[in-house]
Image (cartoon, helix red, strand yellow):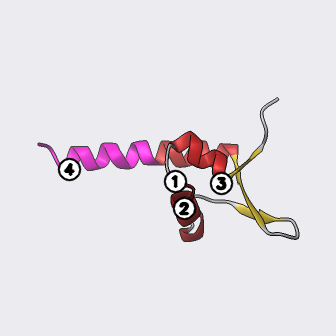
């Protein structure tokens, strides 16, 4: 069974970006996440990550359409 929540490090690995970039996306609100536990560890819901990825595809397509070579 796939886990409902993933760590910021796992998100970074999935997106092939630095963990600091994921943290920045979370802190800006661009990537929804929750902070849980006494140590306040961040978790991203898997479906939120998929929605973020879909939104980035849409944003990229719009950019390409508006900025042809």
Camera-side mark, 4 or 3: 3
Q: Tell me the residue that label 1 is attached to.
A: 18
* Residue 54 locus on image (x, y percent): 49, 42
Q: Residue furthest left?
A: 69
* Region rendered in magenta: 56-69
Q: Tell me the residue that label 4 is attached to.
A: 66
User: Which label is found at residue 8?
Assistant: 3
Give the residue displayed 53% in from the left and 66% down from the top.
Answer: 24
Mark 2: few/some/many CA within 10 Å (<14, 14-19, 20+): few
In terms of image quadrants, where is residue 64? top left
Q: Is residue 35 above or below residue 18?
A: below
Measure the C-alpha gap from mark 1 to mark 4: 28 Å
In terms of image quadrants, where is residue 65? top left
* Residue 53 locus on image (x, y percent): 51, 44
Measure the C-alpha gap from mark 2 to mark 4: 30 Å
Q: Which residue lies furthest to the right in this view?
A: 38
Which badge, 1 or 3, is on the more N-terminal residue? 3
Look at the image and tell me in which quarter the N terminus lies: top right
User: Which label is found at residue 20?
Assistant: 2
User: Which label is found at residue 64?
Assistant: none
* Residue 20 in magenta stretch: no
Look at the image and tell me in which quarter the C terminus lies: top left
Camera-side mark, 1 or 4: 1
Q: Is the magenta stretch mostly helix, strand or loop?
A: helix
């Amino acid at each position: 069974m796939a886990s409902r929540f993933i760590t910021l490090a796992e998100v970074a690995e999935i997106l092939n970006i630095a963990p600091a970039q994921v943290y920045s996306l979370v802190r800006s609100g661009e990537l929804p996440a929750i902070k849980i536990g006494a140590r306040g560890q961040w978790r991203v819901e898997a479906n939120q990550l998929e929605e973020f990825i879909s939104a980035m595809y849409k944003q990229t397509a719009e950019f390409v359409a508006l900025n042809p070579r």
